[in-house]
Amino acid sequence: MTSSAAIGRRVAPLLACIGLLAAWQVAALALKNDSFPTALEAMRAVPAILGDKEALINILASLRRMAIGFAAAVAVSIPLGLLMGRSRTVAAFFNPLLMVIYPVPKAALMPIIMLWLGVGDIAKTLVIFLGVSLPVIYHSFEGAKAVEEKMLWSGAAMGLSAAQCLVRIVLPAALPEILTGCRTGLVLALITMITSEMIARQSGAGNILFNALDMGQYDTVFAMIIIVGAMGIGLDAAFEKVRARLVRWSEPQFDMPLSFS
Amino acid sequence: MKVLPSRSSEVATPGPARQPATAMIEIDHVSQVFQTSARKDHLALSDISLTIEDGAFVSILGPSGCGKSTLLYIVGGFVSPTSGSAKVKGKTITAPGPDRGPVFQEFALFPWKTVLGNVMYGPRQQGVRATEAEAQSRALIEMVGLKGYENFFPKELSGGMKQRVALARTLAYHPEVLLMDEPFGALDAHTRTRLQNDLLNIWERDRKTVLFVTHSVDEAVFLSDKVVMMSRSPGRIRQVIDIDLPRPRRRTELLLDPRYQKYVVDIERMFDDIDEAGVNP
């Protein structure tokens, strides 16, 4: 049975999007400002960008850097966070370092990184790596810390070594928390990707956006914002699908647990 | 305050020294000190000596904070004693091992594994082939009364069912000693009774050595061959009581049995004494 409430839940987000675009359209028409194109003008510029081979190469190069930076950050941060969560010595060593790095906007490091590594892929990927690392380390750390001691004892009684416990008990037990960190990390990867390209203007989605701004092509500017926003929403939704599958066991499938002794 | 002579060891071993071949667990002058703050040490266990024979069902009974769980963790190898030693089959315990299987009050199931996955975990870790481990595990799941729930996740089960899974998971790797840490403490009265009955039925099949920590007097008397009474602050063995009641035990018959009633009343009196004496931490 599809109730009207269920239909309402499906239609509501669509209405919100249409509402936003309508408000934009009305506001742009009312203001009549060159630097504020209407929603329709911006939307018309989207296929023009996506149809342009040069622009596509740029966007794909951005996504490639983002994917590499994100993957490398996750590969380093999860083991580090888990080790920190299970060893006070490791945590005591890394915590102060992370406290120093944490409040620094990663894009602010871009000038130094550019100085050392140039304006190419390596510098930009490194900034993305730094941006993604912190939330993933933090959530892995918290997740590992919260693992019930008795679960580890149960594993040890079965003959698991300390290293096996870390991989086979702490990692899966902390996975819901780790994936929450990865989800935050994914959005941060997109943000640092664009900001790094703003600073090191050479290629990429951020570069298209700011070049258009310099040349006063405001419809392209807004179209790029729509494209980047859509990429973010799409990536986040895809990740959420994967996440929900991986941690199905931690979310209640039934309203109430079965009950009999 | 009168200082009690630390003679608990002699009271605690009323005989098994005669037949050392059957000793499964030997706890020898174990003391445990915890650092509660930078300056204060807390003596959780003081000079505990106890021998548990092979195949015996022994309960450790005492008020909360008497260190009874700590004693169980020492036997499990999860905590090392500050002084003294514990042995299993003559070997000093230094680490956890599959010869000693714990069952915790908190269940401690692996939530990412199904019921079957949890029960199979131990045998698989021990190198049992997957098909064989699965067949054994399915049989155990049936034995603890959970047939049909093999593919459920722990999240979907009630507390009593979770503890059944935890018991099956531990039995699956054939430990020689079961270490049960207030296993039914988190369950409601009805569920608790059912699990006690089922545990006794399972235990009577293969008579593994069981070390069972509880604060419930009737639970200890109903289940055990021997009840070790502990007092608090510091945790010492106060008395070891042999429970001379016939097996197999039926709860409804026992409740009417004057011998059972006497055990319960005597031990409860002792509990009261401990409570009165124990207000001096």
Image (cartoon, coloured by chain):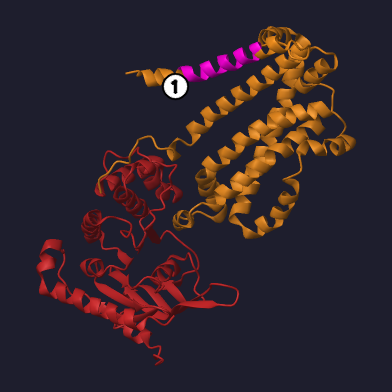
Question: Label 1 is found on which chain of the structure?
Answer: A
Q: Quadrant of the N terminus of chain B?
A: bottom left
In x, y percent, where is residue A244? 49, 32
Please identify the quarter of the rendering in which residue B198 is found.
Answer: bottom left
Q: Amino acid at mark 1?
A: Arg
First to last magenta residue range: A11-26
Q: Is residue B250 visible?
A: no
The reply, left or right, for residue B2 in relation to residue A212 is: left
B153 up-or-down from A146: above or below: above
Which image quarter: residue B209?
bottom left
Colour orange, chain: A
In the figure, is residue A82 to the left or right of A29? left
Picture mark count: 1
Residue at 43% x, 65% y is: B76
Residue furthest front in the image: A30
Q: Position of residue A241 (x, y in %)?
A: 52, 27
Q: Is residue A183 visible?
A: yes
* Apparent colour of chain B: red
- Identify the element where label 1 is drawn: helix
Q: Is residue B60 left or right of residue A22?
A: left
**Percent of width and height locating residue B224:** 24, 69
